[in-house]
Amino acid sequence: MVSIASVIQRALVQSAPLLFGSTGEILTEKSGHLNLGTAGTMYVGGICGVIGAFFYERSIPDGGTLNPFLAIIIPLICSIIGSLIMGLIYCFLTVTLRANQNVTGLALTTFGTGIGNFFGGSLVKLVDSDVASVNFSRTSELYRAYLPFADNLGWFGQIFLSHGFLFYLGIVLAIISTFVLNKTAKGLNLRAVGENPATADAAGIRVNLYKYVATCVGSIISGLGGLYYVMEIGNWSNDGFGDRGWLAIALVIFAVWKPNFAILGSILFGGLYIAHIFIPNISASVSELIKMLPYAVTIIVLIVTSLRRKRENQPPAHLGLSYFREER
Amino acid sequence: MSDNIAIELKGITKTFGSIVANDNVDLKVYKGEILSVLGENGCGKTTLMNMISGIYFPDKGNIYINGEEAHIASPKDALNYKIGMIHQHFKLVDVFTAAENIVLGLKKDYKSANGNSRFKTMFKTGADLAKESIVSLSNKYGFDIDPEKKIYQMSVSEKQTVEIIKVLYRGADILILDEPTAVLTPQETEKLFEILKKMRDSGKSIIIITHKLHEVMAISDRVTVLCKGKHVDTVKTSETTPNALAEMMVGQKLSLNIYRGDPVNPEERLVVKNLNCVSREGVKILDDVSFTAYSGEILGIAGIAGSGQRELLESIAGLQKVHSGEITYNDPTTGKVENLRDKTPMQIRNLGVRLSFVPEDRLGMGLVGNMDIVDNMMLRTYGKGGPFFLHRKNPKKLAEDIVERLSVSTPGISTPVRRLSGGNVQKVLVGREIAASPTVLMAAYPVRGLDINSSYMIYNLLNEQKEKGVAVIFVGEDLDVLIELCDRIMVIGSGHITGIVDGRRAEKNELGILMTSSKKYDENLTDEEGTTDAN
C-alpha cells in the first residue's frame, strides 16, 4: 500500500514538465503564436541536456568525481541552446516568413521527436550497451539533490522538499510570468500584440520583436520541462517522454492562459496522468482510459469557457494569425 | 502667419502598384484650427492621413512640422512629432480596460505615483498609475469615461472617446480623425464636436476626414477637397456652400461612351418594401429601404462605401438577417409572387428564383481561390450531378465556353483562379453567374480594379443581360459610369435611400449632394409628380 504523501509527491514530479511546457506555451501564445511544436521543443530540450550530461560524464575517468557545478550547468546550457534553436526556427518561419503556424508547429514536433530519437539512438550505439537506453545517473543525482533535512520532516518533507532545484524553478517561472504579464508595461505590450497586433503596432510597440522574444523565451522554458523529465528518470530511452508535450498544450487551455492557474492545473494533470498506477487490480485497457482523463478534463474546460463566453478566459484574439502591417 | 503652421505637406505622391492613391498633394494645417478633408471613396483621403501618421511612407514629397522637415516612418515617429490619429476602425484591445489601452506601448509613468517609493509602485500597473492624469484630461475637455471599464463593454462612442484620450495622453498636438461621425448618433456627434472645439480653442490642430457636407459646414474652419488622389482646392468654410463643395468633390464630368439601350417592356421583378437591418452592434445599417427593380433595366446604386449597399444586396440574396420589411419576387414564367425574406440562398434557388449575385469580395464570397475554373463553375451546379459522384462534363464545357467567349486569359481551365489577374477573376465570376440565365442579376462593384477593356466587357455583359429582360442591379462607385450605364440610379446614404434619379437626366453634382445628404427620400412625392429632385 502506498501512502497519500508518496502519491502526491509522485504527482508533483509528473507535474513539473507539464508546468514548464505550459508556462512556455502561454508566453508564446500571448504573442499570438500557437506553437504546436512544444512537444518537439521539450523533446529537444531533453535530448540536448542528455547529450551534455553524457559527454561530461564520459570525459571524467572511471572512479573520478563530477564537478557538481559543471555537471549541472553543462546540460542546462545545452538544453537551453537546443530549445532556443527550435524557438528561432519557429519564429523565422511564422513571424518573418508568415508561414502557417499549425503546419509549422506540427512539423517541428515531428522534427524535434526525430532529433531526439536520432541522437538518443546514436548515444546508445556509442555506449554499446544491451539495453536501448543511455544512462547518466550521476548527473541525474545532482539534479535531484534536495535539502538533507527534508527526510526528517515526514510527509511535509516528502511532498514539498524532496524535489530537485528545477522543480522549484518551474513554479518560480510560472509566478514570474504571471507577474510580468499582468503587472508590467512589457507584459501589457505582449498581451496587446497577441490580442490585436495592428493596435500594438500603432501604439509604437515592435510587434515582431515581441513575438520573437516571447516565442524564444517560451521555447526555452518549455525545453527545461524536457530536461527536468530526463534528469528525473536518469536515463534516456527513445519515445520515453510520451505525450507530455501535448498534455502541456492541453494544460494551457485548462489554465485559461494564466501561468499561475497552470501550477495547480499541472498538479492535477500530473496526478491524473499516473493515477492508473495507484489504482489496484485494473486491467491494461482501463488504465489507458484513466490516462485519457487529462484530455477529457481539457475538453470539459473548453466547453465550459466557451459556454460562459467570459472574454477574459478566451484565447488571445489574434492567436494563430500572422500579422503584416501593409496588408490592405 | 507661416510660423503658425502646424503641419505642411508638399507634393505628396503615393502609389500602390499601378494605382496612384495620392498625386502631388499639398496641404497646410494651422495651429488652433479644424480642417476638414473632403472627398469621395478612394480619392486618397485615408492614404494621405496614413502617411502623416506613419502607417505608409510617401513615394515622393515632403512633410514639414512646425516648419522643419519631418521623416515619419512609423506610428512611433508620428507620436514623437506629436501627431495622433484616430482611425475609423478603432485600434483598441477589447479585453483591456480603457486605462490599459491608453498607456499601451508607453513606459510606466512613475512620476504620477505621487511620491510613493518605486518599490511600492512596482506592484501597480502602468494603467493604475495613469488613472489620475486620465481623469484630469477628461475634466479638461469634457469627456465622460470610466478608466476601469473594459473596451468590449463599451458603446461605439465610448470607444472613440478612449481613442481620443489615448492620443491626448501621449501629448498629441495634431489630431487626425478618420470619419469620426460615421458610427455615432446625432447626439453623440454633437458632443464630439463640442469636445473638438474645446481642443481647437486650446491650440490643437485637428484634421477631420468626412463625407458629410453638413458636418463640414458645422465644425471646420477650412476645407480641403480631394478628388481621384489630387488636391482640388482648399477654401474657408465661411466662404463656401455645400453645393460648391459637392461639385468640387465629384469633379468634372467625363464622357465614357458606354452603350445604353432603352428598357423593353419593363415589369416589376423584385420589390423591396420598408427593409430594415440591424448590425451585430445594434446599429441600423438599412433604414426603411423601399424600391422596385424592373426587368430589362439596369438599376444603379450609388453611395459612399459602407452606406448599406452590401447589406442590401446580401439581404436580397438571403445572406443577411432582415429585421423587418418585405422582399418579394415576381416570377416571370409562372406569374407567382414569391416571398424571399428569411430564406437561405438554397431555399431561394429551390423556389425557382433565378437570382445571380456577383459579390464585392470576389475571392472571398464569389469564388474559391485555390480551386480551378471548372470546380468554381461546379460550386453553383454540383447539386445537378449524380447522387454520389460529381458530373464534371457540363461544368467543364461551361468553363471552356466562358474562357473563350469572355476571352479570359488563363493558361487553362485547370488553373487555380487566384492565379488569374483581377479582371480575369471577375470575368470568370460574372460568366458563371450569367450562365445560370438569371432573371435578377446583382453586381457589386464589378469593375473595381479592372482595366478599361475589361470594364467595358463587363458593361457589355450587363447590357446583354438587360436586353434579355433581366433586372440588373449594379452597385458602382464611379459616378460617370453610373450615369452612362444605368437607367435609374438609386442613391443610398447612411442606410437609407436619399434619392432615385433617372440615369439619362442625372447630374453628377446632384448625385454628389444626395450621397452626402442625410435626408430621407420621399417616394410618394416623386411618384405623383414624376420629378427626380429629392432636395
Image: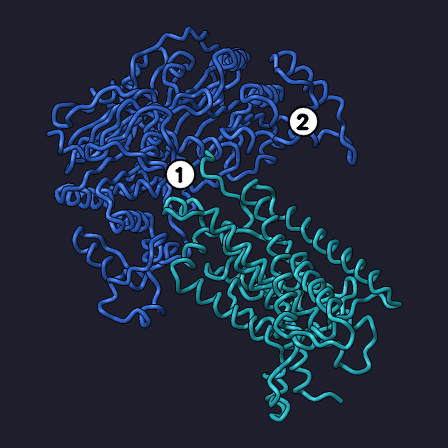
Chain colours: A cyan, B blue
Does any portion of residue B519 appear in the rendered image?
Answer: no
Q: Nearer the viewer, residue B243 or B78?
A: B78
| Residue type marked 1 | Asn
Decide: few, some or many residues near mark 2? Use Cα within 10 Å; few <14, some 14-19, many ≥20.
some
Given the image, what chain letter belongs to the residue carrying mark 2?
A: B
Q: Is residue B45 left or right of residue B395?
A: left
| Residue type marked 2 | Asp
Residue denoted by label 2: B372
Q: Is residue B373 left or right of residue B514?
A: right
Does any portion of residue A166 appear in the rendered image?
Answer: yes
Numbered mark located on residue B294 in the image: none
The nearer-to-camera label among 1 and 2 is: 2
Decide: few, some or many residues near mark 1? Use Cα within 10 Å; few <14, some 14-19, many ≥20.
many
Q: Looking at the image, which residue is at 23% across and 58% down?
A: B133
Q: Looking at the image, which residue is at 49% across and 70% down?
A: A175
| Rendered-image quadrant of the N terminus of chain A | bottom right
Q: Is residue B90 left or right of residue B221?
A: right
Marked residue nearer the N-terminal end (1 or 2):
1
Secondary structure type for disc 2: loop
Q: Looking at the image, which residue is at 65% across and 82% down?
A: A8
Numbered mark located on residue B276 in the image: 1
Q: Is residue B164 left or right of residue A244?
A: left
Q: Nearer the viewer, residue B409 or A46?
A: A46
Given the image, what chain letter belongs to the residue carrying mark 1?
A: B
Q: Are marks 1 and 2 on the same chain?
A: yes
